[in-house]
């Protein structure tokens, strides 16, 4: 290896290590800085979320974990049946226990490290946020190389929505990891057809996505559209094995959910009750409504520079920019489905677009500095650093004044007192 290339690689590794260290620090959950923990001495350096209460969803996740701690994993069908009985009596929807992977991860974390169940769930959310950053870096590296990996890694490290999801016991950050992993693995399978290692990883990731949250439907639609678009855009090769994995993976997830729910009828009843009552909630009507461009407004308020640069990248798309086309189609296809869910729009659901949007934004930055011959990489790095500083400042402002956490309506407070351990 030439000396210059070796020196460049060392610099890349050093820069990546700094980015990961800063990202991990920003994602440490708030309870780690409490007076009883060793990190209390540096609490002033950590941007703390303004919302310090326990949200309704957080309380329900904690109750599900406590039920597993008390009765064991074999009691899961009883937990689902208890949910169905309670949900039948409630006028509004509450989150179901079939969001298994997050609940089970909280149970495992509690079993390994102890502590309160809510703290375990918040630690799991923080852990998966770090994993999402890792996947984003690897994905960008595979798409365009080390420079792009560093740029995307830095932009993801300071993304306000990513930091926010790491600070609360909510499932959406965990779901983002599996969605991004599926998106990356589909790309690898298109580029390396019939490689059984990529196929198995892709199928398993799809199965785990399904048992994480029902929003897997949005990702599934987007992945199918990508496979269809490959006929004209030639991202890679679609094989029978890849189509089989795309079908078999979600089916495996459904089979697992049927087993956990105690039967197909329980699983169907759970989703039927969730869908039928979710759109009738006063809270959902007040906070989840809006026009088709609602997500664009939300994203602009949180990360205006990223959104402007990402939209700018769309005007430079052509068939030679396959990575940009691939990620743009994923955003557009899932956006088309998500913006048509009645009373079901929420910025938390847009977390899975964070890496694709930042990839497109970085592409715009690369295009802007391309005409510059000297010190191009220095200018690019300075631009990324400035955006990261603005994004972190944006998160601090939002966390302090607008906690990015939905207010709870009076009717939903009943959810805090239901679903006692079976």
Image: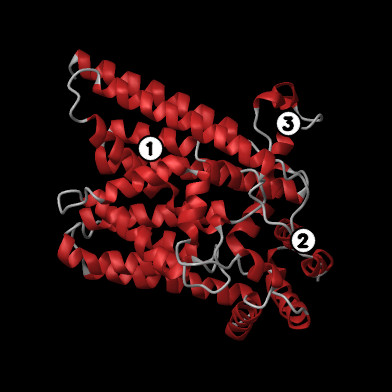
Q: Can I make out residue 320 in this image?
A: yes
Q: Identify which residue is drawn at 64% across, 54% down.
A: 170
Q: CA distance from mark 1 to mark 3?
A: 28 Å
Dot 3: element: helix
Residue 95 visible here = no
At 68% across and 38% down in the image, what residue appears?
400
Q: Does dot 2 land on a helix, a strand or a loop?
A: helix
> In the rendered image of this protein, does residue 81 appear above or below residue 249?
below
Residue, disc 2: 63
Instruction: Give the crowd class for mark 1: few <14, some 14-19, many >=20 residues within 10 Å.
Output: many
Disc 1 designates what residue?
152
| Figure quadrant of residue 144 | top left
Helix, strand or loop at label 1? It is: helix
Name the residue rendered at 78%, 48% in the picture: 53
The residue at which mark 3 appears reads as 33
Q: CA distance from mark 2 to mark 1?
A: 37 Å
Q: CA distance from mark 2 to mark 3?
A: 24 Å
* Residue 348: mark in rendering: none
Q: Residues within 10 Å of mark 2 (few under 14, many from 20)?
A: many
Q: Is residue 68 above or below residue 38?
A: below
Question: Which x, y percent locates residue 98?
Answer: 62, 69
- Determine whether label 2 and label 1 are within 8 Å by CB: no
């Amino acid at each position: 290896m030439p000396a210059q290339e070796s020196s460049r690689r060392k610099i890349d590794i050093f820069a990546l290590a700094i980015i990961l260290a800063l990202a991990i620090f920003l994602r440490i959950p708030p309870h780690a800085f409490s007076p009883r923990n060793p990190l209390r001495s540096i609490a002033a350096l950590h941007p703390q979320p303004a919302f310090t209460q326990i949200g309704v969803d957080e309380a329900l996740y904690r109750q599900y974990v406590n039920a597993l701690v008390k009765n064991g994993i074999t009691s899961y069908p009883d937990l689902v049946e208890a949910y169905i009985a309670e949900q039948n009596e409630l006028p509004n929807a509450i989150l179901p226990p079939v969001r298994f992977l997050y609940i089970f991860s909280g149970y495992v974390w509690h079993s390994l490290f102890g502590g309160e169940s809510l703290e375990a769930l918040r630690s799991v959310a923080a852990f998966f946020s770090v994993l999402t950053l890792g996947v984003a870096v690897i994905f960008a590296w595979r798409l365009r190389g080390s420079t792009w990996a560093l740029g995307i890694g830095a932009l993801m490290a300071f993304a306000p929505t990513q930091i926010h999801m790491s600070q609360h016991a909510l499932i959406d950050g965990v779901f983002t990891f599996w969605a991004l992993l599926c998106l990356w693995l589909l790309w690898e399978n298109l580029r390396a057809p019939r490689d059984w290692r990529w196929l198995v990883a892709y199928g398993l990731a799809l199965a785990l996505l399904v048992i994480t949250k029902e929003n897997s439907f949005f990702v599934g639609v987007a992945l199918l559209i990508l496979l269809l678009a490959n006929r004209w855009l030639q991202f890679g090769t679609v094989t029978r094995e890849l189509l089989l994995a795309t079908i078999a993976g979600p089916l495996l997830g459904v089979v697992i959910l049927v087993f956990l729910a105690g039967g197909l009828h329980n699983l169907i009843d759970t989703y039927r009750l969730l869908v039928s009552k979710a759109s009738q909630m006063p809270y959902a009507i007040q906070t989840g409504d809006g026009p088709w461009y609602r997500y664009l407004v939300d994203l602009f308020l949180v990360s205006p520079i990223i959104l402007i640069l990402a939209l700018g990248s769309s005007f430079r798309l052509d068939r030679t920019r396959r990575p940009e086309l691939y990620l743009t189609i994923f955003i557009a296809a899932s956006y088309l489905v998500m913006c048509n869910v009645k009373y079901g729009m929420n910025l938390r659901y847009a977390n899975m677009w964070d890496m694709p949007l930042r990839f497109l934004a970085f592409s715009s930055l690369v295009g802007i500095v391309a005409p510059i011959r000297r010190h191009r990489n220095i200018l690019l790095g300075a631009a990324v650093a400035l955006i990261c500083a603005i994004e972190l400042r944006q998160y601090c402002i939002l966390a302090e004044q607008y906690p990015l956490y939905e207010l709870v309506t009076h009717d939903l407070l009943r959810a805090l007192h239901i679903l006692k351990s079976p």
